[in-house]
Image (cartoon, rainbow, N blue to C red):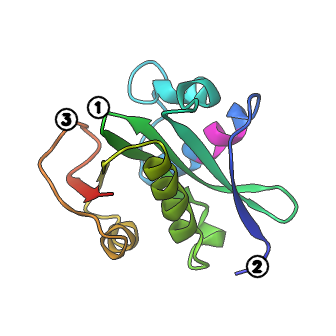
Amino acid sequence: MTGFRIRTLAAGEGEAARTLMREYLAELGLSFDPARLDADLVDPAAYYAPPQAAFFLAVTQDGEPVGTAAVRPLTADTCELKRMFVRGAYRGRGLGRLLVDAALEFARRAGYRRMKLDSRPDLTAALALYRRSGFRPCADYNGNERAGVFLEKEL
């Protein structure tokens, strides 16, 4: 796969992240809820600020953002994979795997021992990617009303 790279979101790039997340939510038939469920997207560069969190963009050679992933702390040793999305026209090119790998690498370097995520049962391609990446079922850890599948991976 050539022509793509994974990089962290810079200050002032929040609109790029919000645009991709609005696309993702629209695909799922959900609405953007910045007051509650999507508060992290009001200022994603600040919300996912290092050293314990990160927001990643997959970008084309021309710098166009086409995918996202984020990591945030849950506890001192457990983090959460959030905001995984690849724009439809760019799926099937390995970008999801690159984003997951970047998130896992960041989590290990940040000292986390476990990563959790939530998803939906209808997102079969994403669930297959997570399972190939070593994630296994776990109990509901966050009560997310949009999710129905909960996974974790020891790092």
The residue depicted at 58 percent of the width and 42 percent of the height is 55
User: For numbered disc 3, what is the local secondary structure?
Assistant: loop
Which amino acid is tagged 1? Answer: Thr
Residue 145 pos. (x, y %) = 24, 37
**Residue 104: image location, x then y, percent:** 45, 57
Q: Is residue 25 magenta?
A: no
The quarter in which the C terminus is drawn is bottom left
Give the class, few, some or many, for how many residues have Cα within 10 Å of label 1's Cα (few <14, many ≥20).
Answer: few
Q: Quick check: 16 left or right of 25?
A: right
Q: Quadrant of residue 120?
A: bottom left
Q: Please state which amino acid type lies under the numbered disc 3.
A: Gly
Q: CA distance from mark 2 to mark 1?
A: 36 Å
Whether residue 83 is visible, yes or no, is: no
Q: Which residue is mark 2?
A: 2
For the residue labelled by badge 2, is the local secondary structure a helix, a strand or a loop? loop
Q: Are marks 2 and 1 in contact (CB under 8 Å)?
A: no
Residue 141 in the image, given as x and y percentages of width and height: 18, 39
Instruction: Say which of 86 and 95 sits in front.
Output: 95
The residue under label 3 is: 143
Q: Point out the image quarter for the N terminus.
A: bottom right
For the stretch drawn in magenta, the main secondary structure is: helix
Is 30 located above or below residue 138 in the figure? above
Q: Earlier in the sequence, mark 3 or mark 1?
A: 1
Q: Which residue is tagged 1?
A: 75
- The numbered mark, 2 or 3, whose residue comes first in the sequence reads 2
Instruction: Please report whichever mark, 2 or 1, sits nearer to the chain's N-terminal start.
Output: 2
Q: How many C-alpha atoms fall within 10 Å of the one at disc 2: few (<14), some, or many (≥20)?
A: few
Q: Is residue 140 left or right of residue 130?
A: left
Label 3 CA crowd tier, 10 Å (few <14, some 14–19, many 20+): few
- Specify start and end residues of the magenta stretch as a single range: 16-20
Residue sitting nearer the eye, 132 or 112 = 112
Q: Image point 39% across, 29% down: which residue?
A: 37
